Amino acid sequence: MKIKSAEFVVSNSEVEKCPKNQLPEYAFIGRSNVGKSSLINMLTDRKSLAKTSGRPGKTQLINHFLINKNWYLVDLPGYGYARVSKSSKKKFQKFITNYFEQRQQLVSAFVLVDIRHKPQPIDLEFMQYLGESGIPFAIIFTKADKLKPKAIEKHVEDYCEMLLKTWEELPPHFITSSSKGIGQEDVLEFIGSTNDEIEQLKSN
Ligand code: GDP
């Protein structure tokens, strides 16, 4: 998929106020500093569509960007633990769980993880939450330029092994580096072909 246009549409803290039309959307989420803003800018070929950490940004909001006038890229805030944490769901900010549970237009989430680190409990718990809630997701490994190819392979293998302890099937995963422009095509292809499938289902 080629990016022909990418425009900021709206920022919200309430899912009810998100765009009302039925375009498919893909939500990007991860711990803060994982490289989410850089990745969004890399994917869309824009220098500063999403605000990177260095600048004050709309960090606690749901940000909608319209891409090629036919799908939304959604930039969600970095997740953290909410103060009251009894069930796994309650560990995440309410407006984030509201978004995932109420947003009909959501096609898939992309959970970003820094490829350099071992699987972190909060990331695994977030994936667990998505799985239990029936929300499709893929994993995007970020900052691949920081490791040598062999180490990348090993870290991804370790991650998959860990996931297979609780999952029967692995979610799709992508290896990316925003600074080296790695993985842009793979992620965009995935989104493009998923959008095509949705169109086909609609026309049947
Ligand atoms: P966010 O908080 O998840 O939106 O993360 P940012 O995109 O603001 O990036 C956090 C930090 O990681 C910044 O210092 C970026 O320069 C750095 N960073 C982001 N992506 C990459 C990458 O692909 N490679 C490297 N080496 N650094 C990255």
Image: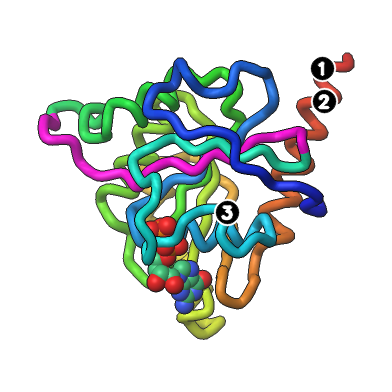
**What is the magenta segment's predominant secondary structure?**
loop
Mark 1 near mark 2, Cβ–Cβ under 8 Å?
Answer: yes
Residue kind at label 1, given as amino acid type: Lys
x and y, in percent, of residue 107 in the image? 61, 30
Q: CA distance from mark 3 to mark 1?
A: 31 Å
Residue visible at 43% across and 20% down? Answer: 101
Q: Earlier in the sequence, mark 3 or mark 2?
A: 3
Farthest residue to the bottom: give it. Answer: 148
Q: Secondary structure at mark 1?
A: helix
Front-most of residues 59 and 91:
59
Q: Quadrant of residue 105?
A: top right
Label drawn at residue 199: 2
Q: Earlier in the sequence, mark 3 or mark 1?
A: 3
x and y, in percent, of residue 84 in the image? 11, 30
Mark 1 sits on what residue?
202
Residue visible at 60% across and 42% down? Answer: 8
Mark 3 near mark 1, Cβ–Cβ under 8 Å?
Answer: no
Q: Is residue 160 visible?
A: no
Mark 3 sits on what residue?
49
Part of the protein shown in magenta: 69-85
Q: Is residue 47 visible?
A: yes
Front-most of residues 1 and 54:
54
Residue visible at 33% across and 27% down? Answer: 95
Residue kind at label 3, given as amino acid type: Leu
